[in-house]
């Protein structure tokens, strides 16, 4: 199911998406072990991270429009989108369930 419709991202974000490090997120499930209970839940960290970057841009643009005294510029928006895009790059398999094995 398409949640956000067609989205457009800046070229810098597309360059990050094209890296092997980001592409590895295609193989990591966002919902952890929930797919064993809900077999149709196939949301990946890849899809989730792209959605976060997109929504982060929308939210920051809305804040900029609503609060011009904050002086949010396009570079600020790009940085927040980049942070949203990359926030899951360190995740292991099965989402946060994997963290138990790292301790």
Image (cartoon, rainbow, N blue to C red):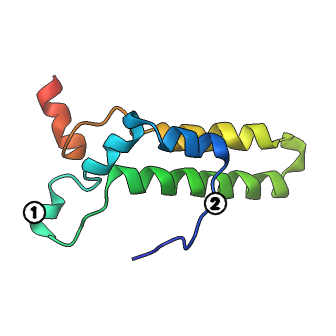
**Marks 2 and 1, the one that precedes in the sequence:** 2
Q: Residue furthest right?
A: 69
Give the side of residue 4 with respect to residue 102, left or right. right
Q: Secondary structure at mark 2?
A: loop
Point out residue 46 in the picture as x, y percentages from the top left corner.
38, 51
Disc 2: CA contacts within 10 A as few (<14), some (14-19) or many (>=20): few
Rendered image: mark on residue 36: 1
CA–CA distance in space, label 2 to label 1: 33 Å
Q: Is residue 7 above or below residue 15?
A: below
Give the side of residue 7 with respect to residue 28, left or right. right
Q: Which residue sits at x=29%, y=53%?
A: 30
Q: Which residue is mark 2?
A: 8
Q: Which residue sits at x=23%, y=68%?
A: 41
Give the side of residue 101 with respect to residue 17, left or right. left
Q: Is residue 96 above or below residue 26?
A: above
Q: Residue furthest top?
A: 103
Marks counted in the figure total 2
> In the figure, residue 73 lies in which quadrant?
top right
């Amino acid at each position: 199911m398409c949640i956000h419709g067609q989205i457009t991202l800046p070229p810098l974000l597309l360059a990050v998406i094209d890296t092997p490090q980001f592409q590895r997120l295609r193989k990591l499930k966002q919902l952890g072990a929930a797919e064993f209970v809900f077999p149709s839940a196939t949301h990946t960290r890849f899809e989730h991270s792209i959605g976060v970057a997109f929504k982060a841009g929308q939210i920051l643009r809305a804040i900029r429009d609503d609060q011009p005294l904050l002086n949010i510029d396009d570079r600020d928006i790009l940085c927040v989108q980049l942070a949203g895009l990359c926030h899951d790059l360190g995740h292991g398999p099965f989402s946060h369930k994997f963290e138990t094995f790292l301790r």
